[in-house]
Image (cartoon, rainbow, N blue to C red):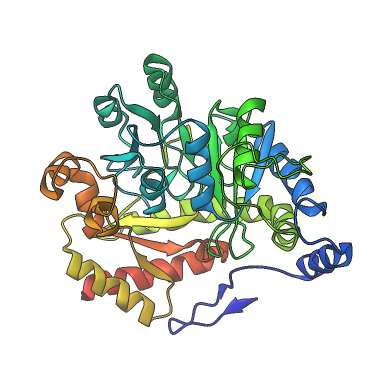
Amino acid sequence: MSISSASGIEFPAWPQYDDTEREALIRALDQGQWWRIGGSEVKKFEREFADYHGASHALAVTNGTHALELALQVLDVGPGTEVIVPAFTFISSSQAAQRLGAVAVPVDVDANTYCVDVDAAAAAVTSRTAAIMPVHMAGQFADMDRLAKLSADTGVPLVQDAAHAHGAHWRGKRVGELGSVAAFSFQNGKLMTAGEGGAVLFNDEGLYEKAFVRHSCGRPMTDRGYFHRTSGSNFRMNEFSAAVLRAQLARLDLQIATRQARWPVLSGLLAKIDGVVPQTIDPRSNRNPSYMAMFRLPGCTEERRNAIVDELVARGIPAFMAFRAVYRTDAFWEAAAPDLSVDQLAERCPVSEAITSDCVWLHHRTLLGTEEQMHQLAAVVADVVARS
């Protein structure tokens, strides 16, 4: 299925689905048990997702934000602790820590990959730091070599925000093979989706069991007497979502292969446009699923960038303004914020400040199009940028 646009480019639709999802939903329906304790779809999805990413365990949850929150909670993040997060990320990265009462400490990102600046993260570590959260922006891995060393040197665990990184590889290793907890999202726009949903990968049996209990209202799977072991919440995924995600996972490899072929073409064309700088792919991030096609307009004001996005949308291009630096939102300051002002954080995070104003991203369905469509898309971007 494709969608016609004002530009005349018929990009593939998203989400993508067919009879595989329909049959999966009927299969889940016919079980007669629609929650994870009585059904089999969630358990099977967890095993398939863990195997696909090279992890011992996967725990399916309600959404990606809850996945981050649960991952932090089992690492004892809470009041009196701090979590280092990139300043440039979707707000869930910081809110997951703040919801637990921990202070979210934003640090700057790399100007080319848009992933956390490891030197900035290292400088922010204190005796209260309970976790460092690299975000694999648009499927581009943060520098996991240096981050692993930082974690080993400081004793501070990593929590990978892999919401954009389904199927990604770092130096040939899958997300689950990198030795740290990782959280994924299955929200409607993500690389595989059931509308909402999330998952956490674990290689530590104890952490997995701790997470399972907390995600099920503090109740072990075998409990019949309501002996809730600990505080928790209901983050359980339902059987219908898991059934759809099993179908989505089965087609992920082909979609990644297509996007991997298209992004080098599109990024090369974008790089030839005066004033446009596409996101750089670190060669060590050697399987990049390209959750977004991202580019910057260095020196661009936020007003001009927004006008460019509006015009791209008017021409039928699925374009978006980049995330705001987390400290540039009211939500960040509602609870558990650092004892610094917006201006002080902005001074520490000049790249995130610039990206807030000058970055544009295109939905990954554009990269499921043909090579010819990459040329057509770049031509539209060039015309809009030149006219703005």
Q: Is residue 52 above or below residue 2?
A: above
Q: Depth check: 37 or 106 in front?
A: 37
Whether residue 243 is visible here, answered yes or no, is: yes
Q: Nearer the viewer, residue 310 or 158?
A: 158
Quadrant in the picture for the N terminus: bottom right
Q: Position of residue 117 (x, y in %)?
A: 30, 34
> Relative to 355, is 278 on the left or the right?
right
Residue 162 visible to an observer of this rendering = no
The residue depicted at 62 percent of the width and 57 percent of the height is 192
Residue 43 horizontal side relative to residue 252, left or right: right
Note whether 7 is above or below 128 in the view shown.
below
Q: How many labels sit on residues?
A: 0
Q: Position of residue 62 (x, y in %)?
A: 60, 55
Query: Which residue is at the far top?
Result: 153
Residue name at image x 47 percent, y 51 percent: 264
Q: Nearer the viewer, residue 121 or 354?
A: 121
Q: Which residue is drawn at the image coordinates 34% and 69% (left, top)?
A: 381
Q: Is residue 312 left or right of residue 262?
A: left
Residue 303 picture location, percent across and down: 18, 70
Which quadrant holds residue 254? bottom right
Q: Position of residue 73 (x, y in %)?
A: 49, 37
